[in-house]
Image: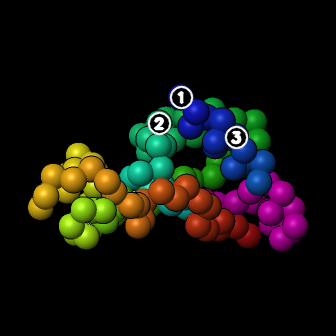
Amino acid sequence: MHELGLLSAMVKTIEGIAREEELERVEKIVLQVGELSGVVPAYLESCYPAAVYKTFMEDTALELEIIPGIARCGCCGREFNAVAEDLRCPDCGGVQLTALSGTELMIKEILGC
């Protein structure tokens, strides 16, 4: 479960940004998680309390935005949700896919005061 390590690194990044912006506290963070990123949103949610334990973000809320894993088939050019179609083109059955969206894992917002 690499999600805990990812969250720990994000907490350090957010702490640095909060210091630079002179925020007294961070109320909520919004993370964008792509369906093709290799990160499991449920694991992020379950690991989050451990990642922020005894940090200044201990009372910070976590919000996740899931970005659909859209891909283009290399055989027929069809664009579709690759996760919903089990990574196989629904038109031709092709598996030569190019990811168009859904590979991201990023901090979208830091809401603080």
Residue under label 1, please give it: 1
**Is residue 103 one of those drawn in magenta?**
no
**Which x, y percent locates residue 103?**
48, 57
Q: Earlier in the sequence, mark 1 or mark 2?
A: 1
Q: Which residues are magenta?
A: 14-29
Q: CA distance from mark 1 to mark 3?
A: 13 Å
Residue drawn at (69%, 49%) of the image = 10
User: Which numbered marker is on residue 8?
Assistant: 3
Q: How many marks?
A: 3
Q: Is residue 109 above or below residue 62?
A: below
Q: For the residue carrying disc 3, how many other residues have a C-alpha within 10 Å: few (<14), some (14-19), or many (20+)? A: some
Label 1 is placed on what type of residue?
Met
Decide: few, some or many residues near mark 2? Use Cα within 10 Å; few <14, some 14-19, many ≥20. Answer: few
Q: Which residue is drawn at the image coordinates 13% and 58% (left, top)?
A: 92
Disc 2: which residue: 43
Residue 105 lies, in percent from the top left, at: 55, 55
Of badges 1 and 3, the one in the foreground is 1
Question: Which marked residue is nearer to the observer: mark 1 or mark 2?
Answer: 1
Using the rendered image of the protein, determine whether residue 39 is visible from the camera's viewpoint: yes
| Identity of the residue drawn at 73% across and 70% down | 113
Between 102 and 58, the residue placed more toward the observer is 102
For this rendering, which residue is in front, 29 or 40? 40
